[in-house]
């Protein structure tokens, strides 16, 4: 019954978002397309997400003539390219982390994929990116807020376990298209298969209680 209740909550969340979506909603990827991209786990990536967030914040504040332009900066987290990844277009209100209704169905499809039996054993990383327009530091902050927003929708609306999903915004510190730093393609969200959830370990069996010797009757 708990599994049926979970499916019911998920379906209810999808219907709620679809009811709000306009008729001109963007074409959403299929659940199977997302699963096919993410179901390629090979090995865990030892990634300290809070530390990476701090690195992005610090690097986005760098200034000076010696600082290379956006298209020439080295990726801040190159190891992320080793992870199974699905790139997705999510429309947000300008300069905000608010998801536009036309992308509600897309987020719902991501949620559907994450509860597929092939992906349930894994933790997921939501990565936000921004094109290299405007202030570099502001871009880092906005990308983090947008990655957090997707995570919150997956957790709060679609009831995906919060323990399974982390989020990080890379701003313009790891462009998706280095040849075109200001192109819209750099605004995509990436969903990544991060690591396998450890198998639960059974607690050691309790030792049987020692029998107390019977007292002799006087």
Image (cartoon, grey):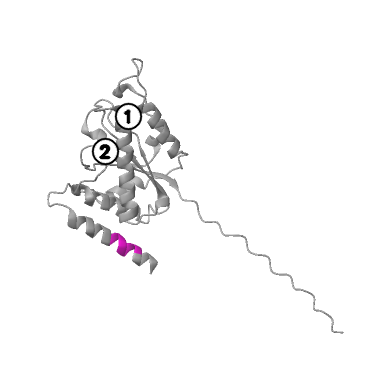
Q: Position of residue 63 (x, y in %)?
A: 35, 20
CA gap between label 1 and label 2 equals 18 Å
Q: Quadrant of residue 193?
A: top left
Question: Considering depth in this image, is 132 or 39 the residue closer to the camera?
Answer: 132
Q: Quadrant of residue 80?
A: top left
Q: Position of residue 118 (x, y in %)?
A: 37, 53
Is 9 magenta? The answer is: yes
Q: Judge the density around disc 2: few (<14), some (14-19), many (≥20) Cα neighbours within 10 Å.
A: many
The residue identified by callout 1 is: 137
Residue range of the region highlighted in magenta in the rendering: 6-11
Question: Considering depth in this image, is 178 or 154 the residue closer to the camera?
Answer: 154
Q: Position of residue 46 (x, y in %)?
A: 47, 39
Residue 175 visible in the current orientation: no
- Please, what is the dominant secondary structure of the magenta stretch? helix
Residue drawn 16% across the image and 49% down it? 25
Q: Residue 188 shows which numbered tag?
A: 2
Q: Quadrant of the C terminus?
A: bottom right
Question: Considering depth in this image, is 197 or 140 the residue closer to the camera?
Answer: 140
Q: Say what secondary structure mark 1 lies in.
A: helix
7 in relation to 87, above or below: below
Residue drawn 59% across the image and 60% down it? 203
Q: Earlier in the sequence, mark 1 or mark 2?
A: 1
Residue drawn 40% across the image and 28% down it? 58
Extreme residue toward the left, this view: 23
68 in relation to 161, above or below: above
Residue drawn 52% across the image and 56% down it? 200
């Amino acid at each position: 019954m708990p599994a049926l209740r979970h499916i019911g909550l998920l379906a209810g969340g999808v219907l709620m978002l679809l009811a709000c979506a306009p008729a001109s909603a963007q074409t959403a990827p299929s659940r199977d397309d997302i699963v096919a991209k993410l179901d390629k786990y090979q090995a865990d990536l030892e990634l300290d997400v809070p530390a990476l967030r701090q690195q992005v914040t610090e690097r986005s504040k760098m200034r000076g003539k010696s600082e290379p332009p956006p298209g020439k900066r080295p990726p801040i987290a190159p190891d992320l390219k080793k992870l199974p990844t699905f790139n997705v277009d999510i429309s947000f209100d300008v300069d905000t982390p608010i998801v536009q209704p036309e992308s509600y169905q897309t987020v719902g499809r991501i949620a559907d994929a994450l509860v597929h039996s092939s992906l349930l054993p894994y933790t997921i990383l939501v990565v936000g990116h921004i094109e290299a327009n405007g202030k570099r530091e502001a871009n880092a902050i906005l990308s983090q807020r947008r990655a957090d927003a997707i995570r919150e929708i997956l957790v709060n609306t679609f009831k995906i376990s919060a323990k399974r999903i982390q989020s990080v915004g890379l701003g313009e510190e790891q462009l998706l298209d280095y040849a075109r730093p200001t192109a819209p393609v750099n605004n995509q969200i990436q969903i990544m298969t991060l690591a396998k959830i450890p198998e639960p370990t059974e607690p050691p069996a309790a030792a049987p209680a020692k029998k107390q010797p019977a007292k002799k009757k006087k």
